[in-house]
Structure formats: structure tokens, C-alpha cells
Amino acid sequence: MDGHSLAYRAFFALPIENFSTTTGQPTNAVYGFTSMLINVLRDESPTHVAVCFDRSEPTFRHETYVEYKANRRETPDDFRSQISLIFEVLDALRIPRLSVAGYEADDLIATLATQAVAQDMDVSIVSGDRDAFQLVGEHCTVLYPRKGVSDLARMTPAAVEEKYGVPPERHRELAALVGETSDNLPGVPGVGPKTAAKWLNKYDGLDELVAHVDEITGKAGESLREHLGDVLRNQQLNKLDCDVPLDRGPADLVLGQWDRDEIHTLFDTLQFRVLRERLYATLSAVEPEAEEGFEVEMARPGPGEVSAWLAEHASGTGRVGVAVTGTWGRGVGDITGIALATQAGVGAYLDPVELPEEDERAFATWLADPKQPKAMHDAKGPMLAFAARGMELDGLTSDTALAAYLALPGQRSFDLGDLALRYLHRELRKEADESGQLTLDGSGEQEAAFDLVVRARAVVDLAEALDKDLERRGAATLLRDVEMPLVEVLAAMERLGIALDIDYLARLSATFGGEVKAMEEGAWEAIGREFNLGSPKQIQQILFDELGLPKTRRTKTGYTTDSEALTNLFAQTAHPVLEHLLRHREVAKLKSMVDSLIPMADEARRIHTTFGQMVAATGRLSSSDPNLQNIPIRTAEGRQIREGFVVGDDFECLLTADYSQIELRIMAHLSEDVALIDAFGSGIDFHTVTASRVFDLPAEQIDGELRSRIKAMNYGLAYGLSAFGLSQQLRIIPDEARALMEEYFEQFGGVRDYLRDIVAKARQDGYTETIMGRRRYLPDLTSDNRQRREMAERMALNAPIQGSAADIIKVAMLRVDRTMRDSGLRSRMLLQVHDELIFEVAPGELAPLQDLVRSEMGAAYDLRVPLEVSMGTGRTWHEAGH
């Protein structure tokens, strides 16, 4: 494989704005290259692999022709920063990468291909460089990217001749005549591939063509004779060197045993969740990663036998693994299969459809028994499905997906089979039948039942291994006391959902639709004709060709027209079409948001989000389907959307409660900065007090601008904000922002020391910790790549504060839920969005609920600065805001 050629192609094929990590590292080149690599390994099943790279040193071609490749533009920084990442991917996959000073990747490929064919190997070359076509032969094929990174043309001798009119051995001569723009090798003016092919075929090659050059008539002949020197030079430079001195030959390039943990760590850093799943789904390791599966004896208790089976095998016998199949989401679920397994290897499969009422009662009693320890993998969905059948799950001592999330917080996927390989070195399959084990009858249903029992068996063993790992990592308490109890609370909230005013949202959609149309017509009027506001190409033509506005950042498809670029352009030019374009996008997005909410409501006109516990590495909960965290709160339109979330029938109002400035209180607690702690205790607005200290002015002289600057500083430091980031936020020059930070740190030295020490400690330990011991592992703190190292440093500053806030709100939810149940209140907790909790208040319960929520949220953690809870009430979510 030609590493540079393919990576460069991927860089321009995939838009960089769509392929960057949340920390800002561009990944389009490494993503595209890795995707192509996985496809080739899957489709070609090679036994020997190498990826060859160019070097920065001049080659023998530069010595021959100083203008060689002189027209190439400088390598983009965003591409250069990804080459080391591609190296890391190859190293983790144990794929050799080769480069030799003074030679191009093509020369290394030519040397290896020639040697391999001589050793009776069949060779595939993956390259975007047409020079490789000269190597094509009976045992050597070039896979050439036609479009993007997934469409590869198989260039055999017949395919080369069909496309270019000459056989592969003549392709170099054809290129010499036509020239190669990318290499700055000019050909014969006015001579294209067809003419060149006709000449080469007529005279049987370039040597004979040169010998008969005087016979070529017309302007083309004159041009050939005039530029014959260029042609001969091109022929010399195009020839690939098949004798590069390499320290490895084809036989040394056996595909190695790739490292699963290394792939996980790297793909977590690059946030390649989908690509990792493709890798594991399509590629198996060269050597078996596990020599055994799980031994299990499966029973299918007949009618009336479930109670006896549970009494003998699953009561008082230790933890039992539970696995289920079914569907769940949007607050509901349905179970199609249940499997149980013990560590002794005894398992049972229950079919809920065929389960007699007596057996279902026996199972439900066992499932709800808190004294019978159970383990499940990602229990929240099955918990919803059990609840739909009137069953309650209790006694859950391990959720192996949640446990893996705490052990591997940067990971995005917690597949049971993958975890079994990592922790148990066993594959998710059954071992050969043991005596007494149920013999498979060959049916798909029986096979699926056995597979489910194997999963239950894997879960119970995996729970033991993860328990030990979490003890070692100091996260066992966090799992037991916070994350596991929260599963039940979140499942209950998902079942309840929140009521929607469908009619109001329909009217709001129509209003937004009217404004979308008005903005479209306004943009047309500003330009003087109609155009498609959703077409980047048309917008580029209008802004940069017709109006001649300043160019934005260049992309593969022209100059970017993303919202940030258009906002900056509007600030520079104030052209009215930009104002209409930006507003059109904003309102169209809001309309789309409203339109997506309406069909999600159930028959009771309630909407049910899904809370994600294993998404954010900081521990924050996520919301999806719909994502209620995406509804803007600081804009009038966002507040209009919140007006559509209403109190349900038979309830009095909604109550919202959130923490006031929780990140800053945590910053004061962690830094132990006396001045910052005193600012909270002053009774005056916190940002005004801190601004007063920084600018050495009385509090009454702190105006809105000075307060805004320090507010940005206060929150920015909690998010790892740099001087450059602060300058962008406040629209001041970086030097001014740096001076402001220095003034701030003069007053709050404890904050400065904390921020410095937390990064140093994280670099030493390899991770940061929250106040409750939640770890964030940051291997890039010691990276040689400056960009990745600085990103990791910002994450080290941010993670303890963000993670601690996540821990506190989770504990608050548990305390509130438990006390509400103990108090016998009918009111209920519906949503958690960021640091806010939303409740539905039963008639007559507002005052006691407010007291309860304020007390339990305030007592969630004992900070040096007390937690302060703000509340609001109303018939709608917006009205209840505060």
C-alpha cells in the first residue's frame, strides 16, 4: 500500500469539518486511510502486508531534475499532523511500514512487488499513483481509488490496456509523452493519451517512435520533435526503481498479531466508534485471540418446572448472569427471550411467549428478590421491558457495561463479546457439548437460545473480572453506590416521559416555517434573483464570484460557507444576504427540531427521551431520541420550544431545580483558593466580586463589560480555556487576554497553582480524578505530537470539574428519588438536562417537594462552598425556568 498517496487522497475526499475529535484533532486523513485499509484486508485477505511512505529528503529524481514536483503546494498542517496517527494505527495492527531516504514509496513498492512475483507470490498494490500501472502483470494487480476512499478499480493487464490503449509495460512511455502535472513533468503540448497510445502501438514502443520521429506529420509531429528532450527525461524519471536497499523482503511482511487493547486505546482517542465496530466485525486476528468459549449446560424448564429449577440452581448459589433479547426504547420495551446462567456453568432458557402464568410468577418473584445477586450487561433497556410485563428487577450487583465504562471511560462501545476477549480471553461461543448438556436440534430458534445462555454465562464471569479491575482502579464504590442505583431511576424517568402540547408545537412549526420562507425571499431580494439557500455551491458562487466578498477558508469543494465563516464574513461586510442566510439556517434548524418532536409523542401525548450513562467520558448523562439537551435555552426561540413541554393531566405544575454556578463552586473547593471561597460567601454577585478584585475597583463600579470579561474567565478556566480561546470569546487580541489572565491569577493564586498542579499530576499518574474517584485516562499527556498533548492538557483541566459536577447531580437524583418514595409523594422526577432536574408536581405537594428537593440536592456533597439550589415553577418548562 502507498501510504502517503492513499492518506492524501483521503484528506481531500473527506471534509475535515466532519472528521475531527471533540478536542479539535483533524482525523479525515487517518479515518479515510484506516477505512480503506480495513476494506482491503477484508476483501483481499492478504497473508503479507506492508505500507510504504515517502520521506522528506530529496530523491534521485530531484538530483536529475531540480524542478521535479516543484509545483506541489506545501503540505497542509492539518494533513501533516495526521501522519503520526496513521503510523500508530499501523503499529497497533502490527502492519509493517517502510520508508527509505532518497526513494519514493513507489520505488519501495516496485522493489517488493518484483521480489514477491519472483518468489511465486500474487501481489496487489493499493495506490492512487498511476506510475504503479507499469508494474501490472499476470501476478500483480493495482487497486486504484476511483472516487473517495471506498471505490477501488482493479487494474489488471486487460483493464490497463482497455483504459489507456497500451499494455502495462508501455504505460510509463505513455506517461512520458503526455506528462504528469502532479510531478511537474510537462509532456508534449497538444498530445493526449489517445494520440500517444496510437504512436506507441504503431511503432512498438517509445524507442522505435524516437527512431522514426521524423516520420510523424502535422503539428503533433512538430511538437513531439520540439519537446523530445522532455519526453526522454520523463521516461527516465517515471521509471520505478526495483532495487531499493530494504532491510526486509516479502517473506518478512507476514500480517502480525494485532493488539486489541492498543486498538481500543487509539480508536477511543480518535473517536472512531463506527470504524472500530467495522474492524472487529470484518477482521479476525491472525492468531486466535481465545482458544476457548464458555462451557454451559442449558435446560429449558417445562411447564411448572421454573420454580424448581430456580430453587435448585439460582437461589443461594451466588451471582447469576441474566441475558435477555427483545426491543426497548422511548420508555417501553418487549422481551422475546430470557437466559440465566451460574458460574458453575448451569443455564436455562425461558421463552416469555410460552411461559405459563405460574412459571412467569415464579420467575418474577426471583427477579425481584433483592437477596439474590444478579449480573446483567446494559440493564436499563431490559429493565424497561421487564416493567412492561409487570416485573421488577432487584438484586442487581453488577452491570458489566457500566463497570466497563468506569474502567475504560474513553471507550465508546462496550460490546459483551469484545469485553469477554479483553478480560476473560474467551470467545462468546459455546464449548463442545458436555455430558448431560442439551443437544442442539439444528433449528435457528434452538441455536439462538443457546447463544443467549452463553451470553448470560459470560456476563457472570465478566462481572467477577470487572469487580477486581474496578477495585484496583478505585471505582468500585462509584459503580455500587452511584451508577448502578441510577439505572433504575433513569429507567423510571424514561417510562414516565414528559407531556407535550402538540397543538402549540404545530403552531410554532408553522411560525418558524413562515420565517424560513421570509428569510429565503429576503436573500433572493438582496441578490436580485432566486437561488437555493441550501446549496453550498450556489452560495459560494454568489458570495465569492458574483459579490466578490473576502474568501473564507478553502476546502476541497471551494471556500467554506459554514455558519462560523458566514458570521465572520457578515461582521466584516454587513452584506444583507449574509444576515438572511444565517437567520434562515437558524430558524430552519429550529423548525426541524420542533417537527421531529411531534411524531415522537405517544398516545398520551408524552415524549420519552433515552438517557445515556456510558457516552461522555466525564460522566455526564446524555439525552437522545430526542436529545433534549440540544434545545437552546439562551435564545427566545429555544424558550418558545420549551413552552411546548407542559405539565401532565392530574398534576399541578412543573418544578425545575438546578445548581447555581456548580462548576465554579467545585473549582473553589478543589483549588482551596481563599479569595475565591470568600467571593462566594460575600453575599454579592460572584462575578462582580471577582471582577472587583481583578480590576481593583469597588463592586459598584464594575460595569457589564468588566463583569462579562471576568465571567468568561471564571467559567473558561473551569473548561481549560487558553489565552487564545479567551481572546476569541471576548474578541480581544491574545496578548490582552494573556494579561487579563495574569491579573486574574495575581488575585486568585490558588486557582493558578491548582490548574498547574492538576496537569502535572495527571501527566505523572496518566489520569485525572473527580471528587468521587471517577477517572479520566489521558495517555496523550506524554504524546510527542504537540497538538494532541495540548488537547490532553485542556481535558486534564476540564475533567475533574465537569466530572465532579456529573457525580454530584447523580447523587442528588438518587437522594431525591429515595426521599420522594420514602415520603409517599405522588410527585415524580421526569428529566435531567445538564444540571437541571424537572419534576411533575402532584396537587398540594409543591411546598413539601420544594423543601425536599432543596434539602437533598444541597446535601449531595459537602463542598467548601455550599451547594446552592435555584428553583422555578410553572405550567410549562419555559415558565418553570428561573
Image (cartoon, rainbow, N blue to C red):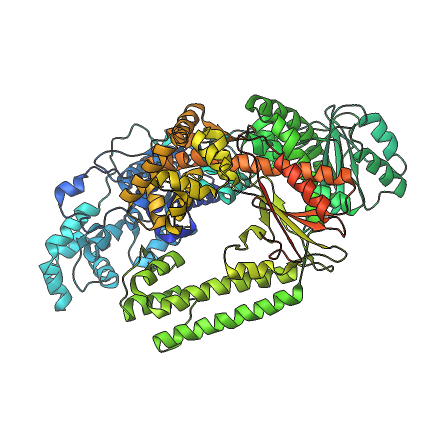
Q: Name the residue: 42% across, 69% down.
A: 533
Where residue 424 sits in the image (x, y, percent)?
60, 26
Position of residue 534 relative to residue 356, above or below, is below
Residue 428 position by quadrant: top right
Position of residue 819 relative to residue 764, above or below, is below
Position of residue 404 relative to residue 881, above or below, is above
Name the one closer to the observer, 685 or 862: 685
Q: How many labels were placed on the picture?
A: 0
Residue 166, visible in the rendered structure: yes
Q: Name the residue: 62% across, 37% down.
A: 858
Name the one closer to the observer, 420 or 496: 496
Where residue 417 sits in the image (x, y, percent)?
61, 34
- Which quadrant holds the N terminus? top left
Left or right: 356 in relation to 421: right
Where residue 408 sits in the image (x, y, percent)?
54, 32
Q: Name the residue: 53% across, 54% down.
A: 633
Where residue 471 sits in the image (x, y, percent)?
60, 22
Left or right: 69 in relation to 825: left
Name the one closer to the observer, 642 or 127: 642
